[in-house]
Image (tube, helix red, strand yellow):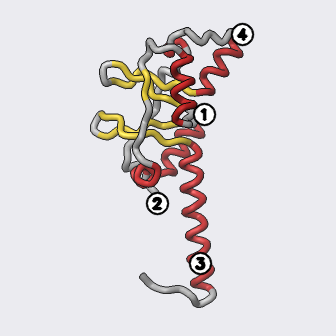
Amino acid sequence: MIKVATILTSKGDNVWTIGPEATILDALILMAKHNVGALVVKENGEIDGIVSERDYVRKTAETRSGNLIAPVKDYMTVEVHTVSPEQTLDDCMVWMTKEHIRHLPVVKDGELIGIISIGDVVKNLLDEKATTIDEMENYILGRYVRK
């Protein structure tokens, strides 16, 4: 079973953060610059929330106003679910499905060490399934080589 640590090893542990008092425009620019869909909101070394493109769109639709100079704290999701590097992708899929979330910050010993997205989880699960299918085909066809 694939663990979160494997995803971080393959994709890197870059995690972009922003402060709660920064403007939503600053957040959107940072997301666009780094081609990410969410930023972890941190203040004084603590996770205060997470803000995503989706948060901005939903709040804009709700208020009928996209205030680009509003602080990130007005748009961020405060209830942040995190995972550890030792958790499995199945664990992540359960959280993401149950809570309708697309990003999970990865925390180890109280420190933010990365972030994974639903895309990361799906890609790795599909890769794992493809490998299993390939190994089964090789075994059935007599091309199985024991490692």
Residue lying at 40% horizontally and 44% vertically, measured from the top left: 13
Q: Nearer the viewer, mark 3 or mark 4?
A: 4
Decide: marks 1, 2 in contact (CB < 8 A)?
no
Q: Total marks drawn?
A: 4
Instruction: Please report whichever mark, 1 or 2, sits nearer to the chain's N-terminal start.
Output: 2
Task: Work out whether 44 lies above or below 10.
Answer: above
Q: Nearer the viewer, mark 2 or mark 4?
A: 4
Q: What residue sits right under mark 1 in the picture?
A: 100
Q: Amino acid at mark 4?
A: Arg
Tell which of 17 and 106 is nearer to you.
17
Q: What residue sits right under mark 4 in the picture?
A: 64
Q: CA distance from mark 2 to mark 4?
A: 44 Å
Q: Amino acid at mark 2?
A: Met
Dot 3 lies on which element? helix
Decide: marks 1, 4 in contact (CB < 8 A)?
no
Q: What residue sits right under mark 2 in the picture?
A: 1
